[in-house]
Amino acid sequence: MIIRHPQIMHVFDQNATKFALLKTRLSEINDIESAAALLHWDQATYMPVRGATARGRQLATLKQISHEKFIDPAIGELLEDLRPWEANLPYDDPAASLIRVTRKDYDRAVRVSSEFMAKLSRHQANCYEAWVKAKAENNFAIVQPYLEKTLELSQEYSEFFPGNQHIADPLISLSDDGMTVAQLRPLFAEFRQELVPIVDAIASQPIADDICLHQDFPEHQQLEFCRTIIERIGYDFTRGRQDKTLHPFMINFSIDDARITTRVYENNLTQALFSTIHEMGHALYEMGNSPDFEGTPLAGGISSGVHESQSRLWENLVGHSRGFWECFYPQLQGVFLRQLSQVSIHKFYRAINKVARSLIRTDADEVTYNLHVMIRFELELDLLEGKISVRDLPEAWNESYRRDLHLIPPNDSIGVMQDVHWYVGTIGGMFQGYAIGNLMSAQFYEAALKFDPEIPVEIEQGNFNLLHNWLKENIYQHGRKYTATEIMERVTGSPLSIQPFIRYIRQKYGDFYSLRNEN
Ligand code: ZN
């Protein structure tokens, strides 16, 4: 029998009560956010066009309510009162982790004034409208003054977080918490230096023929096949669904309701197929969170980089692998007999892994893709540092493309205005997650194969449990408990590095191309 000191018991009870109260408050906020997310999902899938105005208002109202509930000083007091209790718990204890992660979110949310956030969000809506018009008319001048204002507001946002090494750090932290310019700039410089010669070597050799992917592939057959594949991998349709949209995304309203969307091009087999596997990767991550995290800030993915690593791992390292298609290609041929019966698996595999310099990030292959991202990251820093002005941005953009991809966009619509990010977000922090995600995906996958070299053999048999379970165990279940840096070290034993990705690319594409080792 354990007899506790009555006073200690009392303190314990007080802490437990306060912690329970905090969880209740957070769960209510999460409910409001999930309701908003559902409205957003509906807007992007089934809502009739003319519902847009009311929907925008409804979303803004819910967003405001959840924000106000979260920045309530009562939450700050609870977090403060719970500090000594948290300090006595192990770092990775679920309660300590919840308090720590909530405090980080809270500190960030209260630092920036509500007036500023309202001003920023009004401006973003206007800037988006100007971008739509400017892009359609291929006239950057229309959106230029708006983007100048975005730059100003992005700099102003940073000022709420004094003491940062670089003005972009608070903006990067919004999506990739803990990552800094000091860390990313040398990492990306090294990445670019390794990648450019590989792209040059590939581009100097005959380009893969992907005509087999551009035939007539009826939509319902594509969707049916996508469904078969992701169900086989482990996507649970009792905890999610797939619908059509304009720009594919994953969204979740709880750990047991993680939905994905796709778009189908009947003249391009890869669009629906790989966007489905990509979004499934995001969904598996959310669905694999510990059920104890439901309704709390611990549920979800750590950062945009880690989230992207999970979608890219399934989409590229698995979904674009030879072994994967050893299993699924006969089935695909069965569905599209007329189109693919004469196309060998080798030809198909080469086609889906075609590498070519191109102008559009979202269409880029896995080798050249990262160059697109790093160009944007550099330009963001140049703008924030005042090295270039918004007026000079189109020219700086074109010059970067000429330098890294040997192509110059014929117009600004498919040049500097191709991505929506800057025009609806901030300048800074918008793109690094994509490249970080690619690097992490290779590093995580290498660790998984080291743990169990049978994984690729199983994949060839159409069995994904080994890999899926490894990811659940090592990454998914932890939700936001660890930072990106912590999870990387825990899972792979090393800090984030470009080497696993470079090894992966060299090995895979070395089978088709002669890649001189530059070292
Ligand atoms: Zn993604």
Image (cartoon, rainbow, N blue to C red):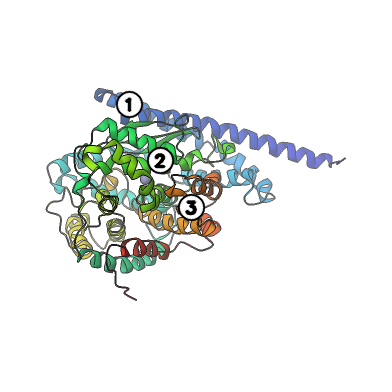
Q: Nearer the viewer, residue 214 or 104?
A: 214
- Please give the name of the residue rendered at 19% of the width and 66% of the height, measured from the top-left corner: 204
- Could you tell me how far apart the alpha carbons at marks 3 and 2 are, in whole angstroms? 19 Å
Q: In terms of sequence position, does the residue under pointer 3 or pointer 1 come before the other?
A: 1
1 vs 2, front mark: 2
Would the CB of label 2 be found within 8 Å of ligand 1? no
Residue 471 in picture, x, y percent from top left: 51, 48
Query: In whole angstroms, how far apart are the C-alphas of marks 1 and 2?
Result: 27 Å
Residue at x 68% of width, y 46% of height: 85
For mark 2, what is the residue? 280
In the rendered image, the vertical position of residue 46 relative to residue 517, given as above or below = above
The N terminus lies in quadrant: top right
Q: Is residue 348 left or right of residue 481?
A: left
Q: Which mark is residue 10?
A: none
Nearer the N terminus, badge 3 or badge 2? Answer: 2
Report the residue at 19% width, 59% height from top: 207
Q: Secondary structure at mark 1?
A: helix
Q: Which residue is mark 3?
A: 455
- Sequence-earlier tag: 1 or 2: 1
Element type where label 2 sits in the image: helix
* Furthest residue in direction bottom, as rendered: 519
> For residue 167, which quarter of the picture?
bottom left
Residue receiving disc 1:
55
